[in-house]
Amino acid sequence: MWPFAKRTARQKEIRRTKAERHGTWYRRLPEQPATLAALSTVATAVLAVLVLNAGGEVLDFRVNEVVPRAITSRIVLEIEDERRTEQMRLRARDRSPNFYKLDVSLLEDIRGRLAGALTLAKAHAHDPQELVRAAAENNVLLDEAGWAELQRLAALEDANEYKHVVDAVIARLKTSLLVEPEPAGTRRTPTEAVLLDPTLPREIRRPMAELRFSNDPAAVAKVVEESVRMTTKPLRESFQTSILAMLGPAAEGEMLRPLFRFDTNRSVQVAEAAKENVPPVVHSYAVGDPLTDAGPIGADELELLRAEHQAYAQAVPAQRQAWFRVFGRTLLAFLVVLGVASYMRRYQQGVFSNHFRRVVSMLVLLLILGVTRFVFIGMDVPPHFAIGMQVLAAGLLAVVYADEAVFAICGALAILITMAAQESIAFFVILLAVSGTMVFGLRVVRYRGKIVLVGTVAATMAFVASIAVGLLAGQHFNFVLIDSLWAAGGTLMAAFVVEGVLPGIERLFRLSTGMTLLEWCDASKTLMRMLAAEAPGTYNHSLLVGALAESAAESIGANGLRCRAGSYYHDIGKINKPEYFVENQTAGLSRHDKLSPAMSLLVIIGHVKDGIEMAKEYGLPASLHAFIPEHHGTTVVQYFYHAASQARGPNDPEVSDTEFRYPGPRPQSRETAIVMLCDGVEGAVRAMAEPTPNRIEAVVSDVIQQRLADGQFDDCDLTFRELAVIEKSLVKSLCGIYHSRIVYPGKEEEKKSAAS
């Protein structure tokens, strides 16, 4: 065991030594940009594939969409007609019988009151008036014929005759079908009524048309009239009046009391049972049976197509074909992503040179693609909603990169969005049209309304293109108009979103738009006011460099506004020690006369470090920080290098120019390289006694050749052709600034006397 343990310890030591020497693989990734780019590209392709294949196939039909031919079923299909089933069930529920329950207590109350009248007649046999009064207290209203007949019956020894009369009236009332109406708001339409009499063993079923309702006074009077026909003629009028009084409302405003009460619970239970007992309505379709005819698709047809689509997706043959479609989408997504990545690497390396910006951009584009895909899966929205998402992506890319190369990325995203929406090539053309409008319209954003203005133009483009594509496909104009309005509205909304998130985009991507740069070009900014007050010569120099740089940059298609803003702040480090720089010195006086060349070098170079610190302190945009160190690059401080060379003794070693160079870095962009040239030529021309055009041209050419020979442009993508164009622009601008002037009368003598 000991030799094995010893060998293991030695191996661990070797691995630890290698890790310390080379670092772990993930720590060394930032040093391998090609590997990082490849990994991010593959990750983007994989995520795009996952998004495109999420949710399965999407039904690409909509209501009122015109289809050129009939659509048939691909499988044997049984579809429940939910709407028809619901209609049949509601019909069964509404036509189920109403249930009414006999109010036995009311009938017994009527029976008791009528039977008690005979007892009162016996008690007041000799006093008719007292009989009428006592009976009225019991709701038995007797007229003259009534109390006379009642007294006659009371005088009889057999009281069964009156009892039979009362029983006959009650029995007649029980069969009178006087019922309580249904509660207010009920919309049921039953055809049959079931009357429940607890004294009978079976239910009584009657058509609803035969019922008489207690809220109809005429019907109640008719029922009572028919019931009292069973009595003797003298009692009919009295019984009719009495029974109507007994059926009267319990309180003012209420309806007459029914003999049969509406049984709500039983009626609802039977109605729901009738609804549940209706079987579903099912339509069967064989393979090849038409689901919809050629022409516009209706709402019912769309539901049928959606059901067939879902059933087909679950079928075994469809699942096999779905895997082929997944493979096709995967292959196409990889081709699109890898193709764009190859194009950008081959022809537009500078666009995605920033790894952080590249990763964030890819994540934002994947997020937009994912939102587009999942909206189509989970919501019933027109595909033209995707146009707004495409415009959102194009607007963000155009603002972030401001380069025509992003149009290639927009084209790739348009392909993926077309696949996500499962649309045709015509839809892809619309996406390209609005993308081009946004990308080329937002190359420079110098005012707040620019994005909305370009978005309005893009919305118009989307509206017109959608109408053209829709009419070309043979769709109805109303259908095309709705799609076009969706396209225009989504595009305009996307422009407002880009406008709203612009400050966040600037912070996230660490960039400055034209609007921000213009704000920092304002002379009222704190740094500009400090520069003008503390170092007026440097301030004027910066303004001249800004004018020269902007003109030169625009001549080669670079960002002229960024050059101007960077020029204004490239020398802010001189604010701390302005008197050590020649442009701020009084004629004949120099602080460097008392310093050694090495000490003067430290002071001069120190303004770069001071400038960077001040830029951070005062919140100068990060995109302008590079102008402070890069406008000098690693050039030699010629004046003090020459002074040091002259001051060395015969036996001293030769002074190396590397000791008198700025710390750099060299210009990393065309813009900082242009400011380097403008800074050099402006100082050189300003030092000339008589800057004639020929001399200016010679000086400009000499400065450019010196910087080129010194390798200052090795890290930026300036070409020889662009250097030639920049040279012409600088010569033209400088000749305009230092042009010859007319000598006015009286001034010539002063000039001659001053010369003598």
Image (tube, helix red, strand yellow):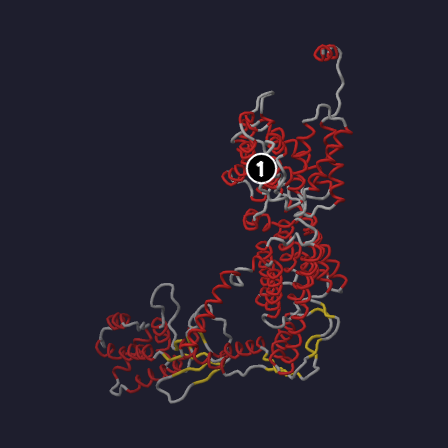
Tag 1 secondary structure: helix
Identify the residue at image location x=68%, y=30%.
684
Percent of width and height locating residue 490: 63, 55
Percent of width and height locating residue 496: 60, 49
The one nearer the camera, 596 or 582, is: 596
Q: Dot 1 corresponds to which residue? A: 520
Q: On the image, which quarter does residue 604 sit in? A: top right
246 up-or-down from 167: above or below: above
Percent of width and height locating residue 290: 70, 79
Q: Is residue 484 left or right of residue 211?
A: right
Q: On the image, which quarter does residue 468 sit in? A: bottom right
The kind of residue on which mark 1 rests is Trp
146 up-or-down from 449: above or below: below
The one nearer the camera, 419 or 453, is: 419
Q: On the image, which quarter does residue 731 sit in? A: top right
Q: Is residue 107 left or right of residue 664?
A: left
602 up-or-down from 105: above or below: above
